[in-house]
Image: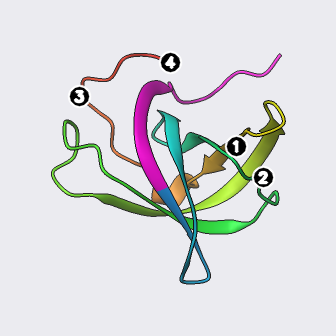
Amino acid sequence: MHRRSYKRFKVNTPVTLVKNGSLEDNCMLNDISARGIGIFGDKSYQIDEKVTVNFALPSLFDEPISKEARISWTAKVNEKFWISGLDFGLDNMLNLVNKPLPLA
């Protein structure tokens, strides 16, 4: 049984993935934790691929977020859509302490 070390919170906002300095994809941010995010989109990503994620959550953060992340996993939902988990790493975590977020 898999147990997450960090609580995940449900969100629904656009996220942009950048790879090697070029726009890679626009997708939706599904959930967020201090350690990473879950995304939903029309592409699959290579496990361990490094990307930069850019998104805004104005109700939680004053400035847009731009973080380096690693693709941890990806899974096909149906013929058109994929979900993926991205890991920020221990040295690049988000501070979600005292943020009003609904649990995922």
Q: Which residue is mark 4?
A: 104
- Marks 3 and 4 close (CB-CB < 8 Å): no
Q: CA distance from mark 1 to mark 3?
A: 26 Å
- Locate residue 13 relative to residue 33 in the image: left or right: left
- Residue 12 higher or lower than 27, as above or below: above
What are the residue bounds of the magenta stretch? 1-15
User: What amino acid is labelled 4 in the image?
Assistant: Ala
> Which residue in the protein does label 3 denote?
98
Residue type, mark 1 in image: Ser
Q: Position of residue 68 (x, y in %)?
A: 52, 66
Residue 93 in sight: no
Number of disc labels: 4
Q: Dot 4 surroundings within 10 Å: few (below 14), some, or many (20 or more)?
A: few
Q: CA distance from mark 1 to mark 2?
A: 8 Å
Identify the mark at residue 44; answer none if there is no mark: 2
Sequence-earlier tag: 3 or 4: 3
Mark found first going from the N terminus, 2 or 3: 2
Tags 1 and 4 touching, CB below 8 Å: no
Q: Secondary structure at mark 2?
A: loop
Circles 2 and 3: CB atoms closer than 8 Å:
no
Mark sitting earlier along the chain (4/2): 2
Q: Secondary structure at mark 1?
A: strand
The span from disc 2 to disc 3 (Cα, nearest Å) is: 33 Å
